[in-house]
Structure formats: C-alpha cells, structure tokens
Image (cartoon, helix red, strand yellow):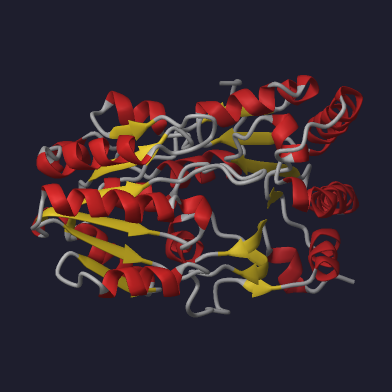
Amino acid sequence: MPSPHQHSIDAIRLVPELRAVHLDRHPRTTPAKNLYFRAKYDLLEERADTAERVTTARAVRHLLTTCASTVELPEPLWIRFYPTWIVLAAASRLGGLLHRRHRGPRRTVVHAMELTPFPVLLGGRHHLPRPVVAGARALVSLSVSTLVDRICFASRASQDLYESLPMARRVTRRTMLELPESCPGAEHTDARPLSAVHVGLLAPRGGVHQLLRAWEEIERAHPSAHLTVVGGGPLLPEVRRWADRAPTSRTATGPLPRPEVLDVVARNGVLVAPSVPEGRWREQIGLPIKEGLSTGATVVTTRQTGLSDWLEEHGHHVVDLVDDELIVDDLVTALSSALTRPLDRRGVRRSLPAVDGRIASDAWLHSRADAPHA
C-alpha cells in the first residue's frame, strides 16, 4: 500500500545525471519529487534535501506506487539511455492507470534538447544499413507517440529531429528556445578588457586542443589578452601545463563550485565554447553559453549548438565546422573580433527573455491546461 506521503506527491521529475544547475533551478521549477541515478562531474556537493539518488528498480517503484499526476522523464533520443527510458515510460503509464481513480489521468512529459541526426545517433561515425535505421526510427517513433503526452523542445533543431519521427508528431508539443534570463547583479560587474573564459569538461569534444592553439595566435596579436579555463576532465593536466608556460595570459582553475564559475564568467568579456562532434555527441545548447549570455558576454562558439542561429542574429560569433572539424584559423578570427570589438554587455542582457527558457518550459510541461502544437 502506498504511504500517505506518496499519495501527496503531485509530480515526479527524473534526471539520469544530476548537475549543479538542476539544484540551482529547483526552487523555481514545479514542485516535484526529484529522482536521479548518478551525479555529473560538475556537482561538487550533493544535497539530498532536493533530490534522491535511486536505482532503476527504485525509480520504477516510485512511478508505480505514487499518485503523481505528472511525470517528467528524460528525452527518449538519449540513445544509450533508451532501453531504461522504455521501462520508465511504461512504468509511468501503468502507474497512472493504477491510480487514475485517485488523481485522474497521469501525464508523461519530456523536455528535449537532442539535435544529432537520427542515423548518427544510432551509429555514430559508422553507417548502419538503411533497414536498421528505418526499424529503429519506427520503434522510437511508436514509443514516443504512445508513451509521451507532452514534449517541449529547447531549440528548433531539436524540434526538427523529433518531427522526423512520423508518429511523434501526434504528441502535443511546443518549442521554447532555451535562452537564459539576465543574471541578477551582472550590471555591477565590469569585465576585464581583452579577456575570455572557457568553461566545461576538458575533453577533446570541447574543442580544447583547438582553443589552446588558437590562443597562442591571439597572444601574439594581443599580448595583454587573457584566457581563463575553468573545469576538470581528462585534459586538465595538459591544460595546466600549458597555462603554467605563460601565467600572465593563461589561467587554468580546475573545477570550481557553480557560484564561483558564474563569478569568473561575469569578469570576462568573451565566452568561448568551441565544441566539436564526437561519435554520437553534439552540443545541444551549452550551459556555459547560457551563463555567458546571462552576464552580457560576447559568445564565440561553433555551429553545433541549437542556439547558433539566435547567436548569429544577435551579433555573436558562430564558427562553421568543415567535415566536422574546427579550423583553428577560423577560431582565431572569431576570437580576435570578439575580444577587440565585444558587444555592448547591457545590450546582450536586454536581448534575453524575462524568464529563463528552461523555467518557462517547465511551467508549460507541468501545466494542466491543454495547448495547441507549436
């Protein structure tokens, strides 16, 4: 028998990999029982008061035994998680049927950010036979159309990907571009001239090697320029050795708590996020890009992010990839332009929405009011 506490839960939100940003936005999202499977690299401390770590079996038990009227699941096109997603989505449906008489119909909702083409999601750099791709597309399309009630896309590229699954078009859906809101107090922080910051996991897919080579060119043209690299990861020892060779123009901080990360970002005029494809992975939005925009930074990034069109339209620098490779000279050109002619920081902040796109999408996903398709 479910406990009285279980009956009182109106929403469940399941996050496979908990990040610091999930905890930061928790007070502003729809009240829910937050479940997660593992902590991500940037979570330097775990707060059990806002999220509960679970196994798949325990997550299924929650979905079957609680009377939640809304369940928010990860997106189904996270391919390596898809088998687990099927189990969770089926458990959500069954749990909703079991408790229908107590709380009415249960709604299963999804926030989607994936934008990698479907064949690449399946095989990475390997070309799979067309019948295999077609069969997988049909399976995922069927599961989305039958197990998801509402889906919100973080970008138009994500919307296009899901709408390439024919039956998924039946799901109530909306696109809300995941832009940040202006960071409170950002107007009181002055950015150092000719300064740039890179934030994230220090791995090849972050374009770290290309950034280091590009910055050496920047130093020759602009001796007073300074780059701060924030984050941990497999390339951290290499980045630290590189920074130690020129400490007046390079700093590698290692991983920092999120409040310190935001402070570092606010004190730099340029946010550089030169991500490149790796296997099935493509940059979806880019949390550092959002952090940079929120403080008024000029962004330098690649075509990967779902924000690329918006960034380009608003004067930021988007570098095209050539055969999925980032050309260092192109990155140098974009960085030099951003450093010497940064956008007006107040203008950048004014271009942002009043409410963070992820907060707005959460409100729509958990709303009980029906809405037309985007």
334 or 74, nearer to the observer: 334
Q: Quadrant of the N terminus?
A: bottom right
Q: Quadrant of the C terminus?
A: top right
* Image location of residue 86, percent across then percent down: 85, 48
* Image location of residue 342, percent across then percent down: 14, 40
Is 48 left, or right, of 184 in this rendering?
right
* Image location of residue 352, percent across then percent down: 28, 37
Instruction: Say which quarter of the image contains residue 333.
Output: top left
Residue shown at 40%/73% (left/top)? 255
Report if residue 353 is visible in the image: no
Residue shown at 81%/29% (left/top)? 141
* Image location of residue 373, percent across then percent down: 61, 21
Is 194 left, or right, of 276 in this rendering?
left
Residue shown at 78%/44% (left/top)? 104
277 or 314, nearer to the observer: 277
Instruction: Say which quarter of the image contains residue 125.
Output: top right
Answer above or below: position of 20 versus 180: below
Report if residue 198 is visible in the image: yes
Answer above or below: position of 77 versus 196: above
Is 90 left, or right, of 111 in this rendering?
right
